[in-house]
Image (spheres, rainbow, N blue to C red):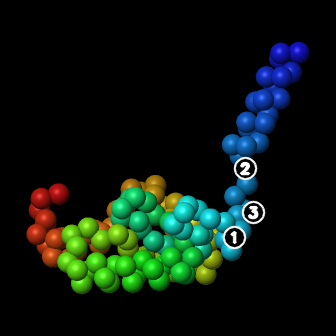
Amino acid sequence: MKSILIILILLQSALCWGADTDNFDESIDVLSGQYVSGGHLIYDCIDQHWVCAMKDNHTICEQKRAEELQQGKHLLSCVSAEIFQSYKECKPRQLALVKSGVRPRNCLHPSERQRLIGFQ
């Protein structure tokens, strides 16, 4: 009886672990309190991660970044990167960037980047 229970638990774990992400609906799937999935690749400089988000998130990022550049902030909040037609097209690029460990230098104000050349 115990062995059957263990086998059932293992099967359930395997099913959950191998869940299919192809059914991910970008129009309704919320990635976090800050992002909804979509075809716009963004790097969140504060939380240090890549995200495929919706157009509104991309627009907010660009507006926020423009304000921060004007204010002369050293660390900017985000970098709007590439634009794809959908989440499914954006996802492989996001995964490749995560796997490679690439972090954009654009998270720093241009004057700050210039000051730090050779010190990183």
Q: Position of residue 36 (x, y in %)?
A: 59, 70
User: Which sits earlier in the primary sequence, circle 3 or circle 1?
Assistant: 3
* Res. 114 in view: yes
Q: Is mark 2 on a helix, strand or loop?
A: loop
Q: Is mark 1 on a helix, strand or loop?
A: loop
CA neighbours of label 1 inside 10 A, class few (<14), some (14 to 19), many (20+): few
- Give the label on residue 19, or none: 2
* Res. 90 in view: no
Left or right: 48 in relation to 22: left
**Residue type marked 3:** Asn
- Give the label on residue 28, or none: 1
Q: Up-down: is 73 above or below 85? A: above
Residue nearer the viewer, 32 or 87: 32
Q: Where is residue 13 in the image (x, y as percent from the top left)?
A: 73, 36
Q: Name the residue under label 3.
A: 23
Count every numbered label the image shows and give the total.
Answer: 3
Left or right: 104 in relation to 25: left
Q: Answer yes or no: do the residues labelled 2 and 3 have beta carbons within 8 Å?
A: no
**Residue type marked 1:** Ile
User: Which sits earlier in the primary sequence, circle 1 or circle 2?
Assistant: 2
Q: Answer yes or no: do the residues labelled 3 and 1 have beta carbons within 8 Å?
A: no
Question: Quarter holding the N terminus?
Answer: top right
Picture quadrant of residue 119: bottom left
Q: Position of residue 72 (x, y in %)?
A: 20, 78
